[in-house]
Amino acid sequence: MEQEMTWMRALAAGSLVAGAALLLTGKRKAALTASGLGAAVILAEDPEAMKELWHAVPDYLQDGHELLGRLEGVLDGISEQGSRVRQLVRRA
């Protein structure tokens, strides 16, 4: 059964995404405010959805942690390759 996207759900999802983005940029108070707004909208529209989201948060955090770990590995690899290129350029 497919549910249609209501403006309240769109507002809630946007608020939660904005909260995550603000948290990643270090703006904790704004992140808490945006996330709180999203949570309040979800709770107002569908309390069961809020329960499901609450239970899914640890999985989302784990996935985000793994993604950041992979990104760190990619950036380390790029940095290492840059060092090798600089060494080759100096030899030439």
Image: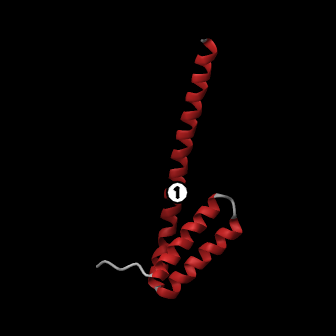
Number of marks in the rendered image? 1
In the rendered structure, the answer to whether residue 34 lies left or right of residue 66 reads right
Colour logic: secondary structure
Looking at the picture, how far across and down is residue 59, in whole percent?
A: 48, 63
Q: Position of residue 91 (x, y in %)?
A: 61, 12
Quadrant of the image occupied by residue 22 = bottom right
Q: Nearer the viewer, residue 86 or 71?
A: 86
From this view, report whether residue 35 is shown above or below residue 90: below
Above or below, 34 relative to 65: below
Residue sitting at x 54%, y 67%: 17
Residue at image x 45%, y 76%?
A: 52
Q: Quadrant of the N terminus?
A: bottom left
Question: Among all residues in the image, which is located at the extreme bottom?
Answer: 44
Q: Nearer the viewer, residue 25 or 92?
A: 92
User: Mark 1 — residue?
Assistant: 64
Q: Is residue 16 above or below residue 92?
A: below
Q: Amino acid at mark 1?
A: Gly
Q: Residue furthest top?
A: 92
Q: Is residue 46 left or right of residue 91?
A: left
Q: Tell me the quarter of the image containing the C terminus.
A: top right
Dot 1 alpha-carbon crowd within 10 angstroms: few under 14, some 14 to 19, many 20 or more? few
Residue under the point 50% across and 63% down? 60
Residue 19, percent from left and from top: 60, 68
SS under mark 1: helix
The answer to which quarter of the image holds residue 15 is bottom right
Residue sitting nearer the eye, 13 or 76:
13
